[in-house]
């Protein structure tokens, strides 16, 4: 059973049909350098924590989820993160606490998006063990994604000096356009 939920958590993040998590993670970490990998892993963990909390609360029927609103909020969280990258003041990396808090908050929103499906597959199983295994899978997949983003960013900036800012702006603009389109589709 552990392996099943672990794989479910991993595929939940890596599944291209659920592009929202991938794009959110890219937008969240594209501004960081490979030297800041610890801060990036804390961001990913804050997101997983938020995701886990609402997944558990919804699975226990403590909160009810309106999927249409949640899907719109997920897209809006991605748009906000990408827009922040585009419009943040020059030479400002922002407060880490604010970024960690935003990652946690957006994790809460994203966790609600998967809760109905998770609850359906959970069936009569106890919640704690499957949720633990699922979230380990989520965290492992997120670590792979953020390390890949950091590595690709590092390679690009080594091959093309002075390319970090254009890379951040280009990537964030594409993600912003995609996510705003998703927000509009959900309205």
Image: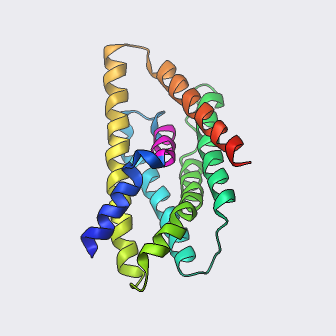
Q: Is residue 23 magenta?
A: yes
Q: Position of residue 130 (x, y in %)?
A: 36, 75
Q: Quadrant of residue 7?
A: bottom left
Residue appearing at x 40%, y 80% in the figure: 128
Where in the figure is residue 143, as x and y percent of width and height?
34, 49
Residue 40 screen position, x and y as percent:
42, 45
Left-right relation of 65 to 115: right
Identified at 62% across, 54% down, the residue is 71
Quadrant containing the N terminus in the rendered view? bottom left
Q: Residue at x 48, y 58 (%)?
A: 46
- Which residue is outermost to the right? 187
Residue 14 is one of the magenta-drawn residues:
no
The image quarter in which residue 164 lies? top left
Which one is nearer the viewer's eye here, 155 or 90?
155
Range covered by the magenta-colored residues = 19-28
x%, y% of residue 154?
34, 27
In the picture, residue 88 is in which quadrant?
A: top right
Indicate how the structure is coloured in the image.
rainbow
Indicate whether 50 appears above or below 74: below
Question: Magenta segment, principal secondary structure?
Answer: helix
Above or below residue 20? Residue 35 is above
Front-lying residue, 34 or 28? 28
The answer to which of 164 and 129 lies nearer the viewer is 129
- Is 186 placed left or right of 2 in the picture? right
């Amino acid at each position: 059973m552990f392996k099943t939920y672990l794989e479910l958590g991993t595929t939940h993040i890596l599944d291209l049909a659920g592009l929202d998590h991938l794009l959110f993670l890219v937008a969240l970490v594209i501004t960081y350098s490979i030297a800041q990998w610890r801060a990036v892993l804390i961001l990913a963990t804050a997101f997983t924590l938020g995701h886990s909390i609402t997944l558990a609360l919804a699975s226990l029927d403590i909160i009810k989820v309106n999927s249409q609103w949640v899907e719109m909020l997920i897209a809006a969280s991605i748009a906000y993160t990408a827009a922040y990258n585009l419009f943040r003041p020059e030479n400002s990396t922002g407060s880490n606490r604010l970024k960690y808090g935003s990652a946690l908050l957006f994790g809460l929103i994203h966790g609600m998006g998967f809760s109905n499906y998770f609850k359906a597959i959970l069936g009569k199983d106890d919640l704690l063990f499957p949720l633990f295994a699922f979230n380990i899978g989520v965290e492992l997949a997120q670590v792979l994604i953020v390390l890949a983003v950091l590595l690709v960013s590092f390679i690009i900036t080594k091959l093309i000096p002075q390319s970090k800012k254009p890379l951040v702006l280009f990537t964030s603009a594409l993600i912003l356009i995609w996510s705003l389109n998703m927000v509009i589709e959900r309205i």
